[in-house]
Amino acid sequence: MITPLVLFNRKPTAQVARLIAWQKARSDLVRVGGIEESTWVEYSSLSGSNTTIIPAYAFQQDCVVRRVIVGLNGSPGANWKFKVFRYNPGTTLYDLVGESVIAMPSGNDISVTFDLTNPISVQMGDIPGLFIPNASNSVHTEVTAPPISSRYTAGDIVTSNAFATAYARGVFLDCFGYPPFLAITGDSQPEGHNGATNWHGPLHRVNPGTGSLPGGLSTSEISNQLRGLVGDGKLLEYQNHALGSSTYAWVAATGIVSSVAVKPNTILSLCGVNDVSSARLWADVETDLDTIKAALTTERLLVSEILPWTAGSDAQAATIRTWNAALAVWCAANDATLIVCHDAMGQIRVATGELDDLLAAYDQDGVHLTTAGVAALAGLWKPYV
């Protein structure tokens, strides 16, 4: 007897199906890269004919760029182009990802909005840019900037280029796409200061030199590893709104504000070691959590337990355990979800008999994570997302 061949339809998991449904239903546009228009204060202008890129203001999520706003200084023209480049690690080159023609209207000193006729798919760390057609065309540039915000070179660049001429001020170019499903906020661990080479998020205002900001080693970022575990590894869209050395006070004042602004489905926060290190009181952290809760609109809030801190004292380790218990109480009372992960990331400290140290395989420097630790924590986060 021949056994019939049975074909099974591989249906997505409930988690993936929910993610797909939410991302397909999006229609609002949020900032995904470039220099935020509300911060534009003119310093000078940059003229053509050249292609200019702004590595210090790279894209903050994997997405499709659908709209750009350009700060036009003068002399409109029909042959402008919005362009996207990607830094090629190990080289000095930036490779062209895509471009879309934009026709400047008449007028000087205006902000011009373009819904792209050819939306461009980008990766986090890809870099927005412009082809400015001729010497009579120019765009405004910012007042304050890291040492190198822009790079440019003559002509319409359609392949790879080193963009060898550095310019200290970024051009006025703001970029928009659909909201991410997830926004991450907190301190250096979620920002990506893990492994042998850090990942720096968009709020970490450093000079990218060659490369981009956001940028660094992607496997050092917990949310990058989380993305790889969901669906086909390219489905989950997120933005990183964490910043190294931050406390819950910073999250309440800044991190949650920037996270809510990108209209995600879910916000995940990992913070606390810096609060313990600076001897803040739980009452202060609880006040910060209340502020975070009040800032939410429709977002689901996930709060990660504070991880073991190998470099912390026995007293500080006890505080972390106490605060994690308090986080559980706060989450239960405030319609938030606690991500339970402290014990799974820890090993016994002889002096306390408790899981107060990071597991040796996960411990990079006493507080940050090895690449293996990043992957492990991403795995612990996945069921909650």
Image (cartoon, rainbow, N blue to C red):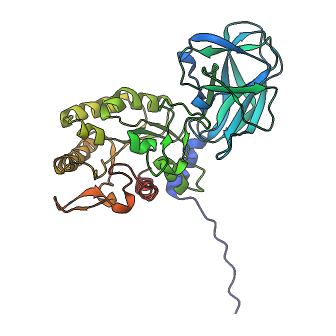
- Number of on-image labels: 0
Left or right of residue 53, residue 77 in this image: right
Quadrant in the rendering for residue 341: bottom left
Q: Is residue 29 visible?
A: no
Quadrant of image for the N terminus: bottom right
Q: Nearer the viewer, residue 18 or 47?
A: 47
Q: Return the x and y of residue 94 as percentages of the image width and height.
A: 70, 38
Q: Return the x and y of residue 206 as percentages of the image width and height.
A: 50, 31
Quadrant in the rendering for residue 232: bottom right
Vertical comparison of 324 with 253: above or below: below
Q: Is residue 189 visible?
A: yes
The residue drawn where x is 83% and y is 21% is 79
Looking at this view, name the residue that lies furthest to the bottom.
1
Q: Return the x and y of residue 260 as percentages of the image width and height.
A: 45, 31
Q: Nearer the viewer, residue 24 or 4?
A: 24
Vertical comparison of 185 with 314: above or below: above
Vertical comparison of 117 with 133: above or below: below
Q: Nearer the viewer, residue 311 or 117?
A: 311
The residue drawn where x is 55% and y is 54% is 228
Q: Nearer the viewer, residue 1 or 337?
A: 337
Q: Return the x and y of residue 340 as percentages of the image width and height.
A: 32, 53
Vertical comparison of 2 with 243: above or below: below
Left or right of residue 45, residue 359 in this image: left
Looking at this view, name the residue that lies furthest to the top.
108
Left or right of residue 268, residue 57 in this image: right
